[in-house]
Image (cartoon, rainbow, N blue to C red):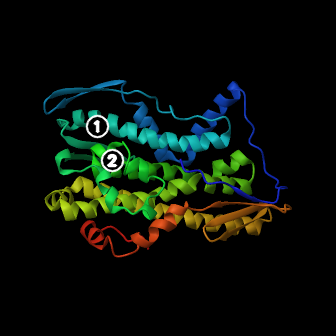
Amino acid sequence: MNFIPKLVLTAAIGLSWNYTYNYTDLLDLKEWVKDATKEYSPDSWDLLMNYESIPPKQEAKAVNGRVITKKTVSAFYYLKGRNMIDLLSSMATNIHEIAHGYCDQNIFRYAREKGIKLDIDNAEEFLFYSPSRSFFISFPLKSLFPSRELVPNIPRNLRTFRYDTYINGRTSTQSEGVIGLLNELHAYYLESKFCYEMLKPYKKAEGSDVMGLFEWVYHSQSKMTAFFEFDFFIKEYLLHMKRKYPDDYRKLLGYRPFTEAYVTIHTSYKELTNKYLQRITREMTSLNASGKGEARIEGNRIWVKEAGSDASIGTPVFSADMETLLPVLNGSRYQEIIVDFLIPRIK
């Protein structure tokens, strides 16, 4: 997680404290976060309940026999924290990780229902987009290359926060290449969508529209920025693939489950970042008109202060990586990828 320091002007800021609680209270707070998720982010709740409904152990037919899987964590395994704000932030991480878990586990149920044989020689993913739409991908591993092959292509000034993990690390983006990158784009989209939908619970957690808005932006900015990072990673992968492995590129371009999943998730995630900005603008306008506080944007940073206070507190709207990547994303480097996959431009 990419935490950006909060900047405070003057020491006399009137912040509402988020106290820690005893064990009984903490259980109640976890239930509060679950109830808030169910109310304000129903798609996230549907994902969690779908995952929870998967049996602890599953079997499915495979090309070379049968395969068995075991579910190792519960639907709320990653939900941790000692106060409301911690738990809201933790639930976002939980949704991201459970999206991966559901992707891994539901493949077995999907294969049984559809009479499909799983293939260990393929990159196979089940991507949850919404309660009514998902994507099953099964693409030959031999037609993919590890994401670390991109290292020489990415200059140091474009090596953003998630570069080490997903381009030069040891995640599924090595074993499954661009399919693994798409899986991460998908998980970050669901995590970001949850954050976007939880503004009211953040206000309730803080007991203040001013500080609720601040904490919501503070805990959303890195997740929203992930869109620009994975847009860059995937386009760079596809461009390299087209130039060095043209036959595999054509095969991937012609594989409809990948193209549909990529375009759908990319488009929705980009629209979400726009809605996020629009909502910040609306909230600032409402706050400034209410007399409860003041809010303003300076560059990429939002500043807020409670009514009657002389202190302002600020946080980035997006991480600095967005501004780092926008020039190359808005340039001509990926024009042929945009045309091939019919991906909307960032602008």
Q: Which residue is drawn at 52% across and 64% down?
A: 275
Front in this rendered view, residue 193 or 301: 301
Q: Quadrant of residue 172?
A: top left
Residue lying at the far bottom in this picture: please name it: 332
- Nearer the viewer's eye, disc 2 or disc 1? 2
Residue at 64% in and 28% down? 27
Residue picked out by circle 1: 107
Judge by depth and name the residue closer to the eye, 314 or 19.
314
Residue 173's label in the rendered image is: 2
Mark 2 residue type:
Thr
Q: How far apart are marks 2 and 1 (CA)?
A: 18 Å
Q: How dense is the environment of label 1, judged by Cα within 10 Å: few (below 14), some, or many (20 and up)?
A: many
SS for callout 1 = helix
Q: Answer above or below: position of 4 versus 175.
A: below
Q: Vertically, is 319 above or below 121?
A: below
| Observer able to see residue 133 | no
Quadrant of the image occupied by residue 228? bottom left
